[in-house]
Image (spheres, rainbow, N blue to C red):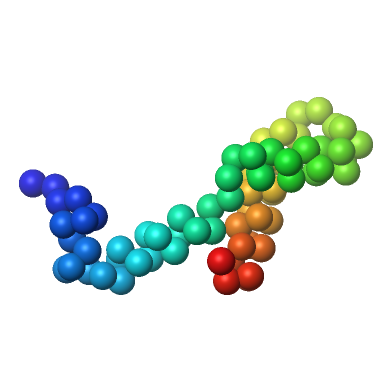
Amino acid sequence: MTLSPAHTAHLHPAASHAQSSQDDVVPTAEAVARRAFILFENHGEAKGRDVQDWLQAEAELTAESLSSGR
């Protein structure tokens, strides 16, 4: 039997809080796309770097969110 987070929140309130905190630092796809496009432009619009630019954008936005305490 698998219990939902709602059923286990009273058992492990910190785990429930950790999940909501983690959701707060995940950037939206739109924000990542905007940042990745800026990186693409900064690299001289070099093709073939789309995955690297996306991952870098996602990492930068996540780090910024964590450092700002959001």
Figure check: 24 above or below 2: below
Residue 55 in picture, x, y percent from top left:
64, 45
Residue 5 in picture, x, y percent from top left:
23, 55
| Residue at position x 21%, y 56% in the image | 6
Residue 44 in picture, x, y percent from top left:
91, 36
Figure check: 40 above or below 1: above
| Residue at position x 22%, y 63% in the image | 9
Tell whether 32 sits left or right of 11: right
**Figure quadrant of the C terminus:** bottom right
Tell whether 55 sits left or right of 16: right
Callout count: 0
Tell whether 21 sits left or right of 5: right
Extreme-top residue of the structure: 47
The image quarter containing residue 60 is: bottom right
| Residue at position x 81%, y 28% in the image | 47
The image quarter containing residue 49 is: top right
Extreme-left residue of the structure: 1
Q: In this rendered view, identify the residue nearer to me: 33 or 59.
A: 33
Q: In this rendered view, identify the residue nearer to me: 24 or 40.
A: 24
Figure check: 50 above or below 13: above
The image quarter containing residue 14 is: bottom left
Extreme-right residue of the structure: 44
Q: In this rendered view, identify the residue nearer to me: 55 or 21.
A: 21
Residue 37 in picture, x, y percent from top left:
78, 38
| Residue at position x 19%, y 50% in the image | 4
Tell whether 19 sits left or right of 68: left
Figure check: 67 above or below 35: below
